[in-house]
Image (spheres, rainbow, N blue to C red):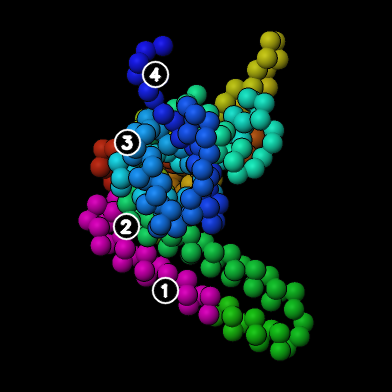
């Protein structure tokens, strides 16, 4: 073991709504700071003193974002890890207990053993776009719930109340769409990316904005890498002479949902995807397999369009 290995420090931070539990891997010590500006300042000062090689936080639904941003601005190398991956690592290493301090130690061990790749964190503009998209999804979810309640209601007063709330939600969704458009059009780069994606028959404004905000890697990776990142790359399930069906798992669920909706439209309006889908069904492929294959093909095409900065063109009938 070299001097560099001895001096390397790895840090795990378990994030909760009010508190950050921080573990220094080399010493195994754990300390806590508030999940607030004062706590971020103290944390940055203490970590800068030990010059960590890597700090790992677990994704906790947004509570980790301000902490990660503060660390990155202070020059501390930080990664936000997938919660399921970290939990699988804990179980694999025999750690079955779960508490904030235990989780901080697991994250520090994960940082030292796995050393996940450091990726640039979203800037404030991209975070704002991401939050607007998330808010739109929340509004759409509430709208669906209220429409379902309306369909099941038989009382005039309740129906009137539900219709009023539905009208409010529909108006707010339209307002959210306008705000999203303003944010996208304020950036020449995002506007160009949106226009490029919209040229593909099957991609609408909401789909395009979701891809711009939540898949910034689009156009920077090869087709296998982008499929694996999104969770559309089939993985083998084999053992000895047994050969199971290949499955997809992991990746970015919201992007898969976006590509699923795009596939539904593309099968109707995009001759290339429609022909591909029908060919798979004719070959005897199950509908679900054909669906996933079409999603992956749409993703591959969009990735190539972004990489070459070339709008979609319908193939010339031969």
Label 2 vs 4, first from the N-terminus: 4
Secondary structure of the residue carrying tag 4 is helix
202 relative position to 195: left or right: right
Residue under pointer 4: 5
The tag earlier along the polypeptide, 3 or 1, is 1
The percent position of residue 239, horizontal first and vertical second, equals 68, 14
The residue closer to the viewer here, 43 or 132, is 43
Which residue is at 32% across, 57% downward? 125
**Residue bearing mark 2:** 125
Residue for badge 1: 175
Q: Which secondary structure, mark 2? A: helix
The reply to whether residue 23 is visible in this rendering is: yes
At a point 65% along the width and 85% down the height, the residue shown is 161
Task: Point out the image quarter for the N terminus.
Answer: top left
Provide the residue span drawn in magenta: 168-197
> Does residue 171 belong to the magenta stretch?
yes
Q: Distance between the residues labelled 3 and 2?
A: 20 Å
Disc 3 versus disc 2: nearer the observer: 2
For the point 38% across and 39% down, the residue is: 47
Q: Do the residues labelled 2 and 4 touch (CB within 8 Å)?
A: no
Q: How far apart are marks 4 and 1 (CA)?
A: 54 Å
Q: Earlier in the sequence, mark 4 or mark 3?
A: 4
| Residue 189, placed above or below residue 148 | above
- The answer to if 162 sits in the magenta stretch is no
**Which secondary structure lies at badge 3?**
loop
Q: Which mark is residue 220?
A: 3
Q: Earlier in the sequence, mark 4 or mark 1?
A: 4
């Amino acid at each position: 073991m070299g001097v560099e290995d001895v001096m390397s420090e790895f840090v795990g931070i378990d994030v909760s709504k009010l508190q950050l539990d921080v573990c220094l891997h080399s010493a195994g010590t754990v300390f806590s700071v508030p999940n607030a500006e004062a706590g971020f300042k103290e944390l940055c000062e203490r970590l800068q003193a030990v010059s960590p090689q890597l700090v790992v936080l677990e994704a906790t639904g947004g509570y980790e974002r301000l902490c990660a941003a503060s660390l990155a601005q202070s020059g501390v190398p930080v990664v936000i890890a997938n919660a399921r991956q970290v939990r699988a690592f804990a179980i694999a290493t025999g750690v079955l207990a779960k508490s904030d301090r235990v989780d901080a130690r697991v994250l520090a061990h994960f940082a030292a053993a796995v050393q996940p790749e450091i990726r640039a964190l979203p800037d404030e503009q991209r975070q704002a776009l991401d939050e607007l998209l998330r808010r739109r999804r929340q509004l759409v979810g509430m709208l669906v719930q209220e429409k379902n309640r309306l369909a099941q209601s038989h009382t005039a007063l309740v129906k009137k109340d539900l219709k009023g709330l539905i009208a409010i939600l529909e108006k707010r969704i339209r307002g959210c769409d306008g705000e999203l458009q303003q944010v996208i059009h304020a950036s020449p780069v995002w506007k160009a990316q949106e226009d490029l994606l919209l040229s593909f028959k099957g991609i609408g404004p909401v789909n395009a904005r979701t891809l711009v905000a939540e898949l910034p890697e689009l156009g920077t990776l090869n087709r296998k890498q982008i499929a694996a990142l999104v969770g559309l790359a089939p993985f083998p399930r084999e053992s000895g002479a047994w050969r199971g069906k290949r499955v997809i798992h992991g990746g970015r669920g919201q992007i898969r949902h976006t590509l699923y909706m795009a596939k539904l439209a593309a099968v109707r309006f995009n001759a290339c995807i429609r022909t591909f889908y029908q060919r798979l069904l004719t070959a005897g492929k199950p509908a679900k397999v054909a669906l996933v294959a079409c999603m992956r093909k749409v993703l591959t095409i969009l990735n190539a369009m972004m990489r070459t900065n070339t709008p979609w063109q319908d193939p010339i009938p031969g």
